[in-house]
Image (cartoon, coloured by chain):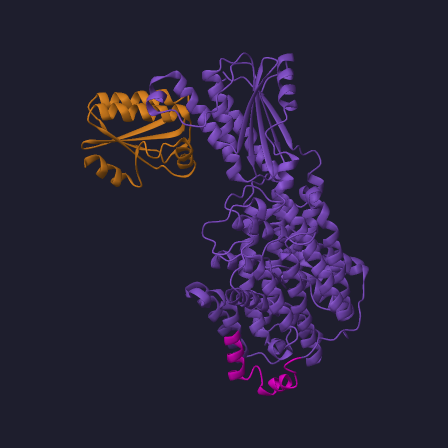
Amino acid sequence: MKLLEEVTEDITIVEPHGRLDSTTASEFGDRLVSLVQAGRSSLVVDLKNIAYINSAGFRALLIANRVAAGQQGKLALRGVIGEVKRLFDIGGFTDEFVICPTQADGIGKLRQ
Amino acid sequence: MGTPDSPERLRLARLVRQSPGPRPSWLQLWRSARPSAQTKKPGEFVHSLDDVPPPLLTAFIGFQHVSLVRIQLIFPALVIQLAELPTEASVNILSFSLMALGVAAILQSLPRGPVGSRYLCPSCHDGIFLEPAIAALKLGGLPLVFGMTLVAGVIQSALSPILHRIRPLLPPEIGGLVVFLVGTSLAAIGCRYVIGVGVKEPVGRDYWLVGAVTLVTTVGLNVWGKGQAKLLCAMIGITAGYGAAIVTGVLPKEAWYVLAELHLFAIPHFDHGGWAFSSAMIMPFTVAALAVTLKGIGDITALQRINDAGWVRADMGSISRGTLANGLANIFAGLVGTLGLTPSTANIGLQAATGMSSRVIGYAVGAILIVLAFLPSVTGSLILMPRPVMGAALLFSACFVLISGLQTITSRMLDARRTIVIGLGIAGGIAAEIIPSFSSDIPHALQPIVGSSIVLGTLTALLLNGVFRIGQRQRVAFVLDPAAVDAVAEVNEFFDAAGRGWGARPDVMVRVAFAINQAVEAIREHCEPQGPVAIEARFDEFNLDVRIGYRGAPLEFPDERPSVEEIIETEAGYRRLAGFMLRQNADRIRTSVRDGATVLEFHFDH
């Protein structure tokens, strides 16, 4: 799985590409947690290039969300569209995360 | 893909195959054949299927439906003009058209018995019968048109009880192709009429202006209009075209004098000269009957969807009865002497727009149409419709027919076989339209087939579809090692190819892909599988069933999602999340353990 990162002042934007399944979720989740523990606890995770996410991917996101909250940080998601949006809906995860339509909106939410 | 068959793999595959699957029972299917007893009223509907609206409201909505149906009288009017009949005989045919439309509306609305879709389903004339009717008119005059319309009705009635069996031979993408070809045929006739190719009257600036006024008014109201103006844009556009034709002299004032001879009330008379039949016309009218049936399946399915908020599958009982009603209406149309009919798609849209789908409105529509059949002066003006006005109306109609056909074609996944079926079907249709001379070199008996774009294109596609079905499997099976790194990718490729081969809906195949991916990963992570995992999928037009067999602990499919704490902190919560998502993703799900092997069964409505 390809993982792009961009740091903008106090916000880190993480953009995974490909699939978030049991093979890739632990690497992805570990990276999010290590970013938070390194003090970059305000994260925008852009899922626009994710083609598939399963229970392992959702668990990784939930863990990162909790760790960020524990560090007084926040995790915002964007790019929740198409099939990924459907899977968020059927898993009942839409209300568990801060989901934003645009990256700018996500950054704004994190700075509130 | 997979590895050589071992005894264990074969045993697992056999177990998966023998599993009955979570399909609906025959009792469920039988119950689904009673729409009003089972359907869930859509929230936005004011008066649904079994409601009885107040009489005034029923009459008002009925007239709206009749307005839409009446516009389509342009098709018999066009054939009548080509036949060059005297005014009274022309109006008489239109009166019988109205009568046949009235009978069709009532038959479709019948609440019980073997005939009728049991929905508010007014019929109309449309382009499907136009090309065969023009060909029959040229070959044997109106008696041949009426006789062959009767034959088409008999064919359609005969098809109705076996529709569910022949559906594989008439897949939806071929239905879309037929609609597309009807659209090209309408567009070609429309263009000829608007430009003035082959018309007798002098063609010049005024002639083109009349076509332009009709088309611009219709399109303008459709795009920018609101409410009734948008709904009745075609009728208003045609009226504006009449106005322009009178002002410019394209429709001379003297032409109106013939209408003065028409009575306000008259009983239509049966003196159309009888019926004629020709073996040369069997094929064009058979294809027209098939095309009307395919279109009817789509229309009645749309009615089922808009009338039932809980719709999950097409009710074939209602579709068969609706097809029989349409067939009987076409027999009636042929007997009394007019063109064939088909369920009206525009009227289905009107139901959704008004929120009124009561069957009682169907009876009102039928009654109004039958009464209009006795008022020749009301319909008489249609026979005077100037050619450029007809051409513009046909062009406008062609836009929607063409796009509707394309949408149906592209709503399915198409593999190489299906792409060739549709591609060559379109090529055949276009060839007949743009190279008409090539039909003159072939035997006389085959000319009605090769000379018609709809017939040639549809037959090409049907024949190729029949040939390509040889060796095509509706059941596919796959055995994989769940520990293999690329196992999931291989399964995805395999089922993508299967979906294209079946012509499955892409949205359903996406759900199937998730089910297989999530299930295989959950088995690998949580169920300690011993040995391979066997996967089998079966497809028919309405069901897609997937079974996954393995030796290992069964997966749990909870009704409620575990809490966030459970998912994060416990292995059980994480495992149950996988089962919960699989349950939510499928329409039905079941798990069973037999001889030490677990079989997961997923059903997807298609």
| Image coordinates for residue B537, horizontal then vertical, percent | 60, 29
Q: Is residue B455 visible?
A: no
Chain that the image shows in orange: A
> Does the magenta run of residues contain B256?
yes
Q: Position of residue B325 (x, y in %)?
A: 68, 56
Residue A95 in magenta?
no
Residue occupying image coordinates x 42% and y 39%: A82
**Segment colored magenta:** B239-265
Where residue A95 sits: x, y (%)? Answer: 33, 34
Seen from the viewer's position, the closer of residues B593 and B371 is B371
Q: Which quadrant, please, contains the N terminus of chain B? A: top right
Q: Position of residue B339 (x, y in %)?
A: 69, 65
Q: Is residue B12 visible?
A: yes
Q: Colour of chain B?
A: purple
Q: Is residue B90 left or right of residue B57?
A: right
* Main secondary structure found in the magenta portion: helix
Query: On the rendered structure, is B92 left or right of B582?
Result: right
Q: Nearer the viewer, residue B207 or B529?
A: B529
Position of residue B534 relative to residue B62, above or below, is: above
User: Where, by quadrant of the figure, is residue B10 drawn?
Assistant: top right
Relative to the observer, which residue lies in front, A80 or B280? Answer: A80
What residue appears at the point 74 percent right and 58 percent down from the top-left corner? B152
Drawn side of residue B445 relative to residue B417, left or right = right
Please tell me whether residue B327 is drawn above or below residue B25 in the rendered image. Answer: below
